[in-house]
Image (spheres, rainbow, N blue to C red):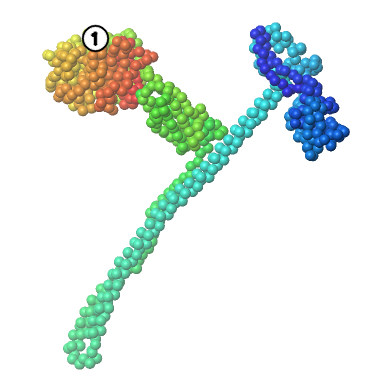
């Protein structure tokens, strides 16, 4: 029988399967060499042939040693010679039995007794062939029966082949290992469930305490009201009682007076005196009628059904307090983290499910959010409970890079948490409208736009000498043609306080006012106009005109009457060079752009410059203040065009909109909506684009 007490090693062949060869030891040879007494040639056992270890390190069975010890002269001498090496061995006081057992031989006997119980799988056809197992193909085979990659090794392949007996051992070991893992996991599961039971008991105790406190508050309020009512009754009783006691005092006083008057009347003989007394008593009798009736009454009554307070209290008590529970199962809850861009608010949607995979319909779960940037910095988040099993997590990634979002419910992570996502440095348009041409959906050199309160868009389509009118969702309404746009020279458009349109024409040098249907209202000009290119309207209705040729700003009343003019050509603060756009700030400031952005008071006094770092680097195309602290400007440089977003108060550049996947080309006018969208006229691409900037 071949022993499975084997040492395995892999022998990888270049052109055939990888065969794991084993060194097999013949059981009989092993037993003869290590498990057989060298004297009597009997196999060691645990009885008569118990292996005994001699001081010379040889092992001899007990039977042989007893026979040697019983020989002539050994017992008297107290020693004997080892039958193997002939070394003199002292006989211990207890005889042969006192010699120590050979622990190594006993261990080998135990090992071989176990090994003999193992069965070496053999081929049913070739009884001398041990079955083999291919780990690559996961199959059992006989080398003689099988051809190909598992046969004579003529086919190339990378197969790992081991004896099937070893495979069985490995599988058993794997099975035991997996079973151990399962047991460990089940133990952890039991610990988790027990922990949750402990938490449940603690939560129930906290809930009991909360109920007791809230009910005690109601009880205290009721007791306070009872005390108020009792005190009110006492006060009313005392007031009434005082009046009645005072009346009694008056009665007693009058009674004493009458008794004093009547004293000695039986001895009175003067008729006139008696008559006078009678007259006085008659008057007294008449006056006593006023005190005959109690001046107060004893009426006191408690009522609680005079209004709806009682039913309201009953109803309120039924609705007072509630106990919330949840069947949400965190391991099935999901979160959707959409792609996002730095500087733009992003919303991640969390959906709660129960253990059966049914979506929850109520909210109130203790959802905990932890969002961090790649360097570990925490990012502020806001959680909105929709109360329908869904939760919105809003956050603003302030810089591009990698983020990690941890979401837990009941202190346990939801499915796939933590979530890893990237905030892109690029901001692309969310919608786009227009093509180059003269049709309904076309533009030809659009330069500016204005937006009404109802978010109706008026785009100055200069090359087509018209104004294209769109709804806020870029649906075409119609066109306004040829008023103020002669010679394809309309360059600026603005909305007045009367909701009319103002157009500036740089060739004709006129400011034309029309209504939103296209009807003419008025037009005016100024003798100092050279190249008026843009205009804006302040809160007083004054019309501000930027004239690039004159390097000045002109201010007019809404009727066209001239008010003032300021500015001159140059690069110094307060001067202009290649003016491009004008708008109004939050305090009626006049904001003008050329290669820089300058801020003036409403009277034309220079105040400051926005973002001086951009000075001299190409030019701006359009500027606008959004009324929420942000100043937006379109800018063209050699390396591209983009929209810059500034903090108006500090003048610092916050970020830029690069429109990475739909590049801007010579962006000009722009408008903002109430929900942080900016619409940009893309002159070079003959279209308009909408971006989100918050």
Residue at image position (82%, 27%) is 83
Q: Position of residue 448 (x, y in %)?
A: 27, 16
Placement of 204 over or under 516, stated as above or below: below
Placement of 381 over or under 444, stated as above or below: below
Left or right: 333, with 120 as reference point: left
Dot 1: what SS? helix
* One can see residue 461 in this view: no
Residue at image position (23%, 77%) is 286
Left or right: 582, with 319 as reference point: left
Q: Residue furthest right?
A: 72
Placement of 385 over or under 434, stated as above or below: below
Q: How many marks?
A: 1
Which is nearer the eye, 100 or 604? 100
Residue at image position (45%, 28%) is 405
Q: Quadrant of residue 648?
A: top left
Check disc 1: other Cα within 10 Å, few if <14, some if 14-19, many if 20+: some
Quadrant of the image containing the C terminus: top left
Which is nearer the eye, 96 or 345? 96
Quadrant of the image containing the N terminus: top right
Which is nearer the eye, 238 or 372? 372
* One can see residue 91 in this view: yes
Q: Quadrant of residue 170?
A: top right
Which is nearer the eye, 221 or 543? 221
Q: Position of residue 487 (x, y in %)?
A: 22, 8
Q: Position of residue 190 (x, y in %)?
A: 59, 38
> Which residue is denoted by mark 1 in the rendering?
488
Left or right: 132, with 664 as reference point: right
Left or right: 404, with 645 as reference point: right
Residue at image position (42%, 29%) is 371
Q: Position of residue 603 (x, y in %)?
A: 14, 24
């Amino acid at each position: 029988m071949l022993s499975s007490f084997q040492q395995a090693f892999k022998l990888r062949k270049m052109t055939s399967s990888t065969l794991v060869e084993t060194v097999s030891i013949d059981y009989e040879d092993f037993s003869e060499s290590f498990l057989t007494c060298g004297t009597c040639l009997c196999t060691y056992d645990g009885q008569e042939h118990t292996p005994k270890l001699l001081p010379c390190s040889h092992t001899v069975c007990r039977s042989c040693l007893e026979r040697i010890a019983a020989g002539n002269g050994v017992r008297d001498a107290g020693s004997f010679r080892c039958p193997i090496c002939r070394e003199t061995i002292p006989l211990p006081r207890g005889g042969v039995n006192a010699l120590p057992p050979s622990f190594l031989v006993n261990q080998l006997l135990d090992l071989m007794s176990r090994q003999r119980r193992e069965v070496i799988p053999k081929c049913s056809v070739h009884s001398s062939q041990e079955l083999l197992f291919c780990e690559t193909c996961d199959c059992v085979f006989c080398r003689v029966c099988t051809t190909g990659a598992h046969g004579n090794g003529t086919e190339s392949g990378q197969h790992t082949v081991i004896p099937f007996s070893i495979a069985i051992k490995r599988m058993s070991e794997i099975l035991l290992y997996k079973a151990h893992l399962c047991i460990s996991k089940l133990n952890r599961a039991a610990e988790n469930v027990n922990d949750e039971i402990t938490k449940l008991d603690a939560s129930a105790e906290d809930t009991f305490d909360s109920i007791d406190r809230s009910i005690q508050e109601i009880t205290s309020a009721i007791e306070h009201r009872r005390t108020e009512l009792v005190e009110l009754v006492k006060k009313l009783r005392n007031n009434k009682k005082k009046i009645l006691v005072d009346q009694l005092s008056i009665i007693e006083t009058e009674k004493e007076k009458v008794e004093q008057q009547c004293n000695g009347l039986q001895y009175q003989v003067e008729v006139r005196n008696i008559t006078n007394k009678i007259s006085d008593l008659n008057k007294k009798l008449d006056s006593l009628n006023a005190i005959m009736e109690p001046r107060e009454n004893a009426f006191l009554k408690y009522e609680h059904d005079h209004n709806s307070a009682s039913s309201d209290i009953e109803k309120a008590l039924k609705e007072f307090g509630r106990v919330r529970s949840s069947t949400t199962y965190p391991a099935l809850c999901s979160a959707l983290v959409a792609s996002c861009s730095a500087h733009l608010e992003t919303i991640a949607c969390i959906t709660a499910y129960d253990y059966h995979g049914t979506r929850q319909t109520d909210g109130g779960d203790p959802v905990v959010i932890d969002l961090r940037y790649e360097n570990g910095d925490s990012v502020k988040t806001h959680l909105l409970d929709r109360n329908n099993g869904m939760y919105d997590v809003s956050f603003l990634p302030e810089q591009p890079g990698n983020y990690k979002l941890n979401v837990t419910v009941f202190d346990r992570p939801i499915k796939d948490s933590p979530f890893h996502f990237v905030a892109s440095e690029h901001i692309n348009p969310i919608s786009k409208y227009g093509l180059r041409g003269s049709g309904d959906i076309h533009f030809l050199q659009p330069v500016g736009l204005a937006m009404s309160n109802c978010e109706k868009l008026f785009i100055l389509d200069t090359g087509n000498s018209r104004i294209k009118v769109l709804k806020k969702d870029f649906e075409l309404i119609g066109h306004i043609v040829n008023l103020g746009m002669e010679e394809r020279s309309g360059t600026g458009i603005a909305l007045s306080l009367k909701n009319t349109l103002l157009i500036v024409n740089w060739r004709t040098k006129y400011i034309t006012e029309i209504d939103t249907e296209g009807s003419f209202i008025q037009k005016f000009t100024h003798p100092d106009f050279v190249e008026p290119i843009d205009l804006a309207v302040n809160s007083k209705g004054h019309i501000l005109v930027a004239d690039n040729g004159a390097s000045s700003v002109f201010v007019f009343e809404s009727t066209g009457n001239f008010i003032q003019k300021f500015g001159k050509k140059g690069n110094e603060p307060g001067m202009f060079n290649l003016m491009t756009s004008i708008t109004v700030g939050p305090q009626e400031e006049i904001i003008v752009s050329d290669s820089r952005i300058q801020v003036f008071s409403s009277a034309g006094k220079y105040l400051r410059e926005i973002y001086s770092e951009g000075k001299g680097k190409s030019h701006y195309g359009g500027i606008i203040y959004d009324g929420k602290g942000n100043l937006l400007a379109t800018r063209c440089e050699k390396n591209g065009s983009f929209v810059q977003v500034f903090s108006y108060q500090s003048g610092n550049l916050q970020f830029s909109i690069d429109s990475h996947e739909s590049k801007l080309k010579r962006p000009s006018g722009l408008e903002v909506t109430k929900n942080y969208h900016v619409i940009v006229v893309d002159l070079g691409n003959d279209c308009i684009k909408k971006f989100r900037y918050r």
